[in-house]
């Protein structure tokens, strides 16, 4: 990899948006001993030129030209634009690792094709499952491994006041809205599997259309709930809904806080992601509001750096993304057929 063999990875960024501005740009600049942005591309070329001037790098006019540059070692695919997953395929052809911040569960078939290309090329591919790196999640994992014991039940709800943009905390506006089951659903599914340390044995989903479809933006449900049964009798029940500020005004402020209860063998915890956790065990009740240092972006980029260099890394892989996309597909099947789907069942 040239310069990056002994020091920094030279980064080509594809898609400039909120995820870039809020998470990865600040992180990559902080981690300048490990990363250097050398090229950017965006479907709005003027935006790319402006960012390139700020970063003292090159604004590319095409995806192929960015991926082919000799001073680009890795490709960061961060914003859904006209090209979809096409840059990831180009990177595989060029044998360049990919960091992917796009929601991958929307098209399981396309993702399977990409996974085969990744396997054939042998390149590192890291999907962004940011909730794994939230401070409250990491603290909970420590507690489950020590005082609380194995998790047995996860109960949670997530509310969107607009659209959740790829696991960024809090209400946001997403320019390319995705179905709730894809975003945040697929990320919450991955989070539950991560905590349980296993894949579910069966799933069932329910949905509701609170605002009539004729008045809503599209026909997707605005409330979805899923129940996943894990080996040994453990389970997770998670609900997520989109609230319409225009219709309900400030009513959402008076609803119970979004969060997740995790019941384990020897205690229980309550999480308000990303940084707050309260738990009870034999020693009493405890509460922590954890520092966001290192930032979520720093943790993710550190995982990717280690993955690219072949070092031990907890980074998820494209096969994790494929498994989550498969779960989403089975929950969609459950919603359609109105029944529990055993994951050993053949898809129809």
Image (cartoon, rainbow, N blue to C red):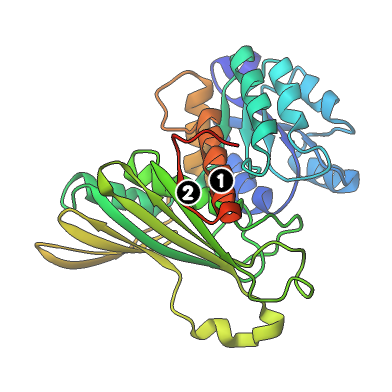
Residue in the picture at 21% in, 44% down: 145
Q: In this rendering, is residue 212 above or below 193? A: below
- Give the number of the disc on residue 135: none
- Which residue is at a point 81% across and 37% down the rendered structure image? 83
Tag 1–tag 2 contact (CB < 8 Å)? yes
The answer to whether one can see residue 45 in this image is: yes
Quadrant that contains the C terminus: top right
Check the image and name the residue furthest to the left.
Answer: 282
- Quadrant placement of the N terminus: top right
Q: Residues within 10 Å of mark 1 (few under 14, many from 20)?
A: many
Task: Where is residue 17? Give x, y as percent.
Answer: 73, 51
Q: How crowded is mark 2: few (under 14 residues within 10 Å), some or many (20 or more)?
A: many
- Tell me the element at label 1: helix
Q: Kindly identify which numbered label has been placed on residue 189.
A: 2
Q: Which mark is in front, 1 or 2?
A: 1
Give the residue number, with chain letter if any, for mark 1: 328
- Is 160 left or right of 268, judged from the image as shown? right
In the displayed structure, 84 sits above or below 124; it is: below
């Amino acid at each position: 990899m040239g310069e990056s063999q002994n020091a920094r990875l030279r980064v080509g960024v594809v898609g400039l948006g909120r995820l870039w501005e809020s998470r990865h740009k600040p992180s990559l600049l902080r981690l300048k001993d490990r990363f250097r942005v050398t090229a950017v591309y965006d479907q709005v070329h003027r935006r790319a030129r402006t960012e390139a001037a700020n970063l003292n790098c090159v604004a590319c006019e095409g995806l192929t030209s960015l991926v082919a540059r000799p001073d680009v070692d890795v490709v960061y695919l961060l914003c859904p634009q006209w090209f979809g997953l096409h840059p990831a395929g180009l990177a595989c052809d060029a044998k360049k690792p990919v960091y992917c911040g796009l929601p991958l569960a929307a098209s399981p078939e396309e993702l399977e094709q990409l996974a085969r290309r990744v396997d054939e090329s042998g390149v590192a591919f890291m999907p962004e499952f940011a909730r794994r790196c939230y401070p409250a999640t990491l603290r909970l994992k420590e507690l489950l491994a020590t005082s609380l014991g194995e998790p047995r039940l996860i109960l949670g709800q997530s509310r969107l006041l607009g659209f959740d943009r790829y696991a960024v905390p809090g209400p946001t506006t997403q320019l390319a809205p995705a179905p709730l089951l894809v975003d945040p659903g697929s990320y919450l599914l991955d989070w539950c599997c991560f905590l349980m340390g296993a894949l579910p044995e069966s799933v069932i989903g329910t949905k509701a259309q609170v605002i009539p479809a004729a008045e809503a933006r599209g026909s997707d449900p605005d409330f979805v709930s899923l129940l996943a049964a894990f080996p040994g009798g453990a389970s997770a029940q998670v609900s997520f809904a989109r609230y319409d500020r225009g219709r309900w005004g400030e009513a959402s402020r008076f609803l119970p806080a979004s969060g997740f209860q995790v019941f384990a063998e020897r205690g229980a915890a309550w999480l308000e992601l990303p940084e707050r956790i309260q738990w009870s065990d034999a020693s009493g009740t405890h509460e922590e509001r954890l520092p966001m240092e290192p930032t979520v972006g720093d943790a993710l980029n550190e995982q990717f750096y280690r993955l690219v260099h072949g070092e031990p890394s907890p980074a998820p892989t494209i096969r994790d993304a494929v498994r989550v996309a498969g779960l989403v597909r089975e929950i969609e099947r459950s919603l359609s057929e109105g029944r529990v789907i055993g994951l050993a069942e053949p898809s129809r």
